[in-house]
Amino acid sequence: MTETGYADRAGAGMLAVARLAFGVFFVGSAVLKLMATGTMVKMLGGAGFAHPLPWIWFAALSQLAGGMALIVNRLVRLACIGLIVYVTLVNVILHGFWTLDGEAASIQFQLFSKNLGIIAGLLAIGGVAGTWGLARKEVSYA
């Protein structure tokens, strides 16, 4: 361990880049949802949502709050858990490849698998988060 508290500076840097990349990904996705609300309403309506607008607002707020927490390095573990729950719900509700055939099933499987990768990354980041957000330095690397 060095005087900075990190066992490996390169690993700490990689973790910071991953945290920031996920943060930008989720904030960007929230902004896109808010900019294309009409398109999102049609998409969720087509997926069977009777009143999609509140769900779009919930999704955008979840992504914005979680993404910003990752970017500013606060409440990282809590943000990761919340985003994991969100992505899991999206996978189960919107990417049910198991109910489809052919090209549609293939596309939904790719989206489902991509989301599993996002969940894995969030698990890794949340797993090394140093505290629940109460300390000045949120993420440590060991």
Image: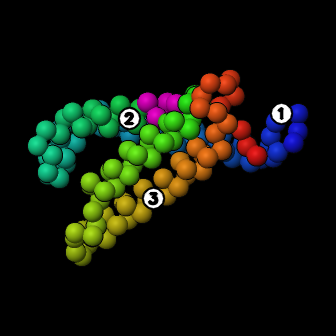
Whole-angstrom CA distance, mark 1 to mark 2, is 33 Å
Residue beneath disc 3: 116
Query: Which residue reaches farthest bottom?
Result: 102
The image's mark for residue 4 is 1
| Residue type at the position of mark 3 | Leu
| Residue 51 x %, y % | 13, 38
Dot 1: element: loop
Residue 26 in picture, x, y percent from top left: 44, 40
* Residue appearing at x 33%, y 50% in the figure: 89
Could you tell me how far apart the alpha carbons at marks 1 and 3 are, in whole angstroms?
33 Å
Q: Which residues are the magenta region?
A: 65-70
Give the residue type at disc 1. Answer: Thr
Q: CA distance from mark 3 to mark 2?
A: 18 Å
Residue 59 lies, in percent from the top left, at: 32, 38
Task: Specify whether residue 66 is painted magenta.
Answer: yes
Could you tell me which residue is drawn at 38 percent across and 40 percent down?
29
125 up-or-down from 61: above or below: below
Q: Residue furthest left?
A: 50
Q: In screen coordinates, is 112 left or right of 41?
A: right
**Residues tagged 1 and 3 counted as in contact (Cβ below 8 A):** no
